[in-house]
Amino acid sequence: MIAARGWVFSLLLLEATSVLHEGERVWKQSGGRIQPRQRALIRFVKHPPADPGEWTSWFSVDHPGGNGDYERLDAIRFYFRDRVCERPTRMEARTTDWVPAQNTGQVVHASLPEGFWCLNKEQPAGKTCLNYAVRFLCPTGSLLQDSKQFWSPWSTWSACSAPCGKTGVQTRIRTCLAESRLDLHCKEATEEGRLCFGHSCAECNLTCSMGRVNAECNACMCEDHVLHGRVALADGMPATEATVYLQSENLKLLTETDSNGGFRIPGMCPDGKNILKIKKVRYATATVPVPESTEKSSIIHVRLKRADKPYMVNNPVDKVRKIGQTVALCCKAVGNPAPDQYRWYHNGTLLDSSVYKYNSKLVLRNLNMDQAGEYFCKASSDAGSVKSQAATLSVIATDEAFCNPRPESYFIRLPHDCFQNTTNSFYYDVGKCPAHKCAGKTDIGFQCKDSTAYCCGVSKMETREIECRGYTLPTKVAVECDCGVCTEVKTTVRGRATATDNGEPMRFGHIYLGNKRIGMTGYKGNFAIQIPADTERLVLTFVDRLQKFVNTTKVLPFNKKGGAVFHEIKLLRKQAPVMIESSETNTIPLGDMEGDDPIAELEIPPNTFYRQNGELYTGKVKASITFLDPRNMSTATAAQSDLNYISEEGDMLPLHTYGMFSMDFTDETASESLNAGKVKVHLDSAQVRIPEHLQQIKLWSLNPETGLWEEEGDFEPDTSTRRKREERTFLVGNMEIRERRLFNLDVPESRRCYVKVRAYRSERFLPSEQVEGVVISIINMEPAAGFSSNPRAWGRFDSAVTGPNGACLPAFCDEQRPDAYSAYIMASLRGEELEVVSSSPRLNPHAIGVPQPYLNKLNYRRTDHIDPRIKKTAFSITVAKPSPSTVEESNGPIYAAENLRECEQAHYSAAHFRFYRVEGDRYDYNTVPFNENDPMSWTEDYQAWWPNPMEYRACYIKVKINGPQEVNVRSRNMGGTHPYTAGKLYGIRDVRTIRDMEQPNLSTVCLEFKCSGMLYDQDRVDRTLVRIIPQGNCYRESVNSMLQEYLVNHLPFAVNNKSGEYTMLAPLDPLGHNYGIYTVTDQNPSIAKEIALGRCFDGTSDGTSRAMKSDVGIALTFNCAEKEVAQQSLFQPQQNSAKQGERPRIRRRQRETCTGHASMRRVTQCRSLPRV
C-alpha cells in the first residue's frame, strides 16, 4: 500500500492525505497547500482602495481561440444570470493560472458595461491571448451567499488508467470560487483520487473466415496472400509517398507508396472486411475495402482527389422574431472531405453544443432579448475550417411594432419651374419606408429560410398638390409604414469582357459558375447573367474558346437588394508558346518589365511532363507561360479573383501579390494538354524588400470554383550550386502542375483598413441623390519611393458596389508610417466612368467630403492634378490608418479593419470620398416616387410609372428639331383609358436636344414616355396619354407616316388641336425604329432605359450608340424659331390648360388613396374622390 500511495503521489504531483470511504481508497488534495500570487487589479479599472460590496465568483466563458478571449458581461449574464448583479462597481481579471492581467504583458481591454476582452491580432507576432477569467464587485446584498457559491461541482471520474487485470487510479477535480485561495472556504480538497481495477482480461474471441488471428487480436492474417496496389492522382500521375493505413480502433500504418505510386502488403486477408485508408498531403483521404478473392495475390487501384477546404455555400439569413417565439438559423459548407463538425457563435462567443444540440442548424426556442445579436457558424473538416457570414437576429417585445409607422424623410427634386418658397428649394419631402426585414405572418418554426419574406414598406399614401409656376403638380406622399410581403426582385450582372492591352472583345466565350456553364459572351464581348437566389459570393470564370486569353476567374460584387450591375472584365492575353524539350532542364523567366530583372524563374526538370492518363511524355512541349507583373500598372484590373484566402481559423483574409502566372503545356501538335510533376520556382529576393514578407511569402494556387487561393508551399533559401554562382540571391519553392494552372506569389497581409466612398447623381452631393449599383474599384499600391519596400507596383485590386449607404473598400494601411501605402480609386456605372472632385488649384474639403487637417494627411489628388489633359475620373490617396487619439480621424473616411461595421453604417454626415455623374439637361418626375437604383422602393399604386416590379418596360420616342438652338422637350404622361387613372398624372420627363455637329440648324432628342399596358393589378390595360411639348416658338412639322397609320388604326385616337405639341395614346405594341418608337423590357429599370436609349440614339431596333444619329428613326419633327424675350415657356402652361384634360388647381387638398404595400393584397385600393 505504501508503494501504491507513493505512485499515486508522483502521478498527481500533489501533497495528499489518505481517507478511507466504503472500501475504496480516496486521496484528497488540499487547496490551502498552494500559495497563490498576491491578487492585483487591472490598471485601467480605477477605484478606491476598499470598495464596499461583495465579489462574484470567477467566470471564464470563452477560450483564446479564433480572434481572442472575450469575457463579455452580456455573455456571462446569459449563462450565469443569477450570479452577476445588474450594475457591477469594479472588475478584476486574471489568467486561469492566477496571473493578474496587468502582469501578463499582453494588450487587453476592459469596460464595466461590456466586460473584458483580449484580441489575438494585438499581441506580438506568434503570440495569442492567454485564457482569462473575470469577476465583478457588486453592491452588498445583491448576490446569493450560500456554500455552493464557493466551489464548482466535482468533475466526473477520469477513466481508469489500469490495463486489464491490473490496478490503476481515477481522479476528479473541482475549483474554489472564493475571492482568494487563502479564503477559509478553500481549505477543503480540490482534487481526489481513488484506486480502480482494469477490466477483466478475456480470451481473444475474434474469429477469421480465412487465415488466422494476429497477436494483437485485432485483425486476421493470411501469410500466403499478397495485396498489390497502385495509387494515382486525379490526373493519372503516380501518387508518391502516400501512406497506407489499416482501419481498426486506431489506424495502423502499413506501408508507403513508391515512386510509381505502388505498394505491397503481404499477409492481408482478401475477405472483404479489411478497409484501407490512404493519405497524402493536400489530398483527401481515400477509403478502400480490400475485395474478396481466392487467389494468392490481388490488386487494387486507387485515385486520390485533391482535398478541398470547406467552402460556405449557404449562410444564415437575417431574421426578426418576437419574445417567446422560435427561430432556426442554418448554414451549409461543402468540401472534400465533407465538413464533419459545425460550431455556432453568438456575438463572437461559442455556444455550448451540449445545451443547444446543434449541427448545421441552430434552433433557439422561447427567445428573449439577450439572444438578439449576430450569429455565425464555423464548419470544419480534416482539410480546414471556414466561417459563415454573420446573420442578425432581431428580437422585439411582444407589444412592439415590427416597423416604425412614421416614414423617414425622402426628398425628390421638383421641375425647374416649381421652386418652393416654404422650403426655399426645389425639393419636396415625400417620405419613404426603409425596407427592413420584419416577421409579418411568417410560419414561426424550424425553417432555415422563412417561406415568405416580409419587409417594412408603405401602407398608406396621400395625394398632395404642389403649386408650381402656372400649374399644379400632384404627388403621392408616404404617411404610414407597416410590415408586408417584400417586393420580389431579381439580380443581374451585365458586363463586357475585353483584352487588357487593346480592348479586343472575347467573342463567344463561355462563362462558368463553378463547374456549370451558365452563359456566353456576345460578338462584342457583352454578357448578362441572372444571379441565382441566395448567392452571397459570385464567382465566374471566363473561358476563351479561341485560346487567345488566359482563363479568368472573377469575384464580382453585386447589389443584393436586386437590380443590375455592370462590370468591365479585363482579360490577360496569352503569351505565344515556346517549344521546349521534355528531356532537358528548362528555365523560363517570370516578368518582362523593361529595365527590370524578372521577379522569378520557373525551372522545369527533365522528364517531368505526363499525359492525361498518367503516362510519362517524351518529346517537344509547347509551353505558354503568362505572367501578370504587378510592376505594370495597366495589368491591375486583370488580377484574378479578389485575392483572398481562408485562414486556419476559417476567416477570409487578404493577400498581397508579387505576381500571378498561368501555365499551359501541350504536346507538339497542341492536341493534348500535359501535366507536370515537381516544378521549381526561384524567386529573386531582391524583388521582396519588405523584410517580414521574405519570411511570409508562399506559393498559392487558385480554386476556380470558390475564387479563393489555397496554399501550395513555402519558399526556402536556394542552396543549389547553380544559384551560388549568381550575384542575386533566390528563394525556391516547389509545386506540381495538374488540374490547377493559375499560381500566385503572395503574402498574407494583416495591415488593413476600409475606405468609405459614395456616388451621387450630381455635384450637389445631396443625400437623396446617392446612386446605388456603382462599381467602385481600388488599386492598392506598394509603398512609395523612399521606403524599404518594393519598387513602385500595385499589390491588390478590389471592387465593391454602392448601396443606399455607399461602399467600403478594403485597402492596405500602416499605423506607424501613415504615408507608407497609397491607393487609386475609380468608379463606373454601366461602363460610364464617374468624375471626382478636383484637387487643384486648392483643396475644397466641403466638396471632397473630408475635413481638414485629415484631408492633408491623406494627400488627396485627382488624376489631372498635375496634367489637366488627363481624365478626371480617379483620385489617389495615402491610406493613413486613423489614430484612435485624434478626434478628426475617428469619423471616416478611413476605418480600421475591425471597424468595418462602423464604416458600413456611417451616417451621411461622416467623412467620405465622392464620385458624381455628369448627367446633362435631363429631369425625371414620378407622381409615385420610385428609386430606380433600389427595386425594393417600388410601391403598389395605380399611378406608378413602373407597374410591374419584376418586369420593367422602357419606351422612348425620337424627336427632331429644325431650328438654330437646342431646346428642352417635355413628355407629360397621364392615364388615358383606365377608369382609375384617366386624366391623372403618371410623371414628367424633360430633356434637352443634342445638336448635330455637321448640320447647325438641326438637333435631336430621345424622350422617354410611359409605356401603355397593364397597371399594377394586372387586370386592365391603360393606353397612356402622352403629350410631347417642345419649349420655345415651335410648331409640329411632320409625324412619322407609319406611326400615324398605327395610331389611326388602333383606336381611340388622340386629337391634336395644338400645333406646338403632339398628343398620342401610346401604342401597346413595341413598334421599333421604323416608327421612331424604341421599347426594351428588362428586369432592371436602369438597364431597360439604357438599352432603349442606345437604340434610339442609333436609330435602329438592335444596335446601340452613344452618339446621336439625327436623321434616322425619327417619329416627330418640330420647327422651332428663336424664342422671343417675353415669350412664356411651354413648360409653364396657363392654368386654363386644365380644360384640355388636366385637373383644376386644388390647393393642398389631400386624399388618402389607401395604397397598400407592394404585396399586401388585403388592402383595397380606394377609388379617387370626385374632383372639385
Image (spheres, rainbow, N blue to C red):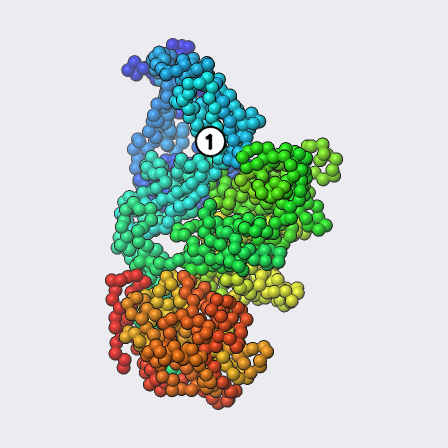
Where is residue 34 drawn, in percent x and y?
Answer: 43, 25
* Residue 867 higher or lower than 149, as above or below: below
577, 563: nearer the viewer: 577
365, 231: nearer the viewer: 231
Where is residue 123 drawn, in percent x and y?
Answer: 53, 40
Q: Amino acid at mark 1?
A: Thr
- On the rendered image, what quadrant is the C terminus found in? bottom left
Instruction: Tell me if mark 1 has few (under 14), some (14-19) or many (20+) residues whose alpha carbon lies within 10 angstroms of its own.
Output: many
Where is residue 985 drawn, in percent x and y?
Answer: 35, 76
Give the residue drawn at x 53%, y 40%: 739
Give the residue drawn at x 51%, y 58%: 522
> On the image, which quarter does residue 61 sit in?
top left
* Residue 570 higher or lower than 474, as above or below: above
Q: How many marks?
A: 1
* Residue 978 higher or lower than 61, as above or below: below
Give the residue drawn at x 43%, y 55%: 530
Q: Secondary structure at mark 1?
A: strand
Q: Is residue 536 visible?
A: yes
Q: Is residue 883 visible?
A: no
Residue indicated by mark 1: 285
Q: Is residue 1018 left or right of residue 797?
A: left
Q: Is residue 189 left or right of residue 259?
A: left
Where is residue 839 drawn, in percent x and y?
Answer: 60, 65
- On the rendered image, what quadrant is the N terminus found in? top left
782, 569: nearer the viewer: 569
Give the residue drawn at x 53%, y 76%: 1110
